[in-house]
Amino acid sequence: MHYGVAYRLAPDRSQRENRVRYSLKHIGSAITMASLTTFLTGLMMMPATVLAYFQLGQFLMLVMVFSWLYSTFGFLSICTAIGPKDNFGQLSITHLFRKCGVCRVKPDHSMEPAQNENEVISMDDNVPNADLPPEQQNDITTSL
């Protein structure tokens, strides 16, 4: 997943090889260290006398070795050969929703800043009961 995100965020989107180099350069060491530390965790479980811990250690080591090998060599090789170029395959979910009519919502203008720089916005404008006399306003501390 991380290699794929780095591949997608590469600045040179027209060349697959440059995108793979970018992803290896920027995220490869972090992925290697994460898989190494998880592998070492499984290795530390190997001397356990409880069968469940021993099997969990074996499982962690096997998963880390094969997932690191596949992601670093397999996935990036596939991206070099047939990975997406430019913005091919990038689906914009909001664009799709607008086409089918799901995202037709009126914009909320109540939170927009003042248009006139001389206009002053009072904090009491958004407070309920602000226009009432003080004796009729609800006191928050007494209502709790």
Image: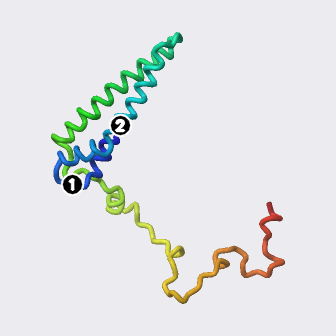
Q: Which mark is residue 61?
A: none
Answer left or right for 106 relative to 12. right
- Determine which quarter of the picture holds residue 32: top left
- Determine which quarter of the picture holds residue 1: top left
Q: CA distance from mark 2 to mark 1?
A: 22 Å
Q: Which mark is residue 31?
A: 2
Position of residue 16 measured from the top left corner of the image (x, y, whole percent): 18, 47
- Determine which quarter of the picture holds residue 120: bottom right
Residue identified by numbered label 1: 12
Q: Could you tell me if the residues under marks 2 and 1 are in contact, i.e. CB atoms within 8 Å?
A: no
| Location of residue 32 with respect to 101 vertically, above or below | above
| Location of residue 75 with respect to 85 vertically, above or below | above
- Residue type at the position of mark 1: Asp
Residue count near mark 2 (Cα–Cα under 10 Å), binned few <14, some 14–19, many ≥20 = some
- Residue at 60% x, 82% y is 121
Label 2 sits on a secondary structure element that is helix
Viewer-nearest residue: 52 or 135: 52
Position of residue 61 measured from the top left corner of the image (x, y, whole percent): 39, 22
| Location of residue 17 with respect to 142 vertically, above or below | above
Give the colouring mode of the picture.
rainbow
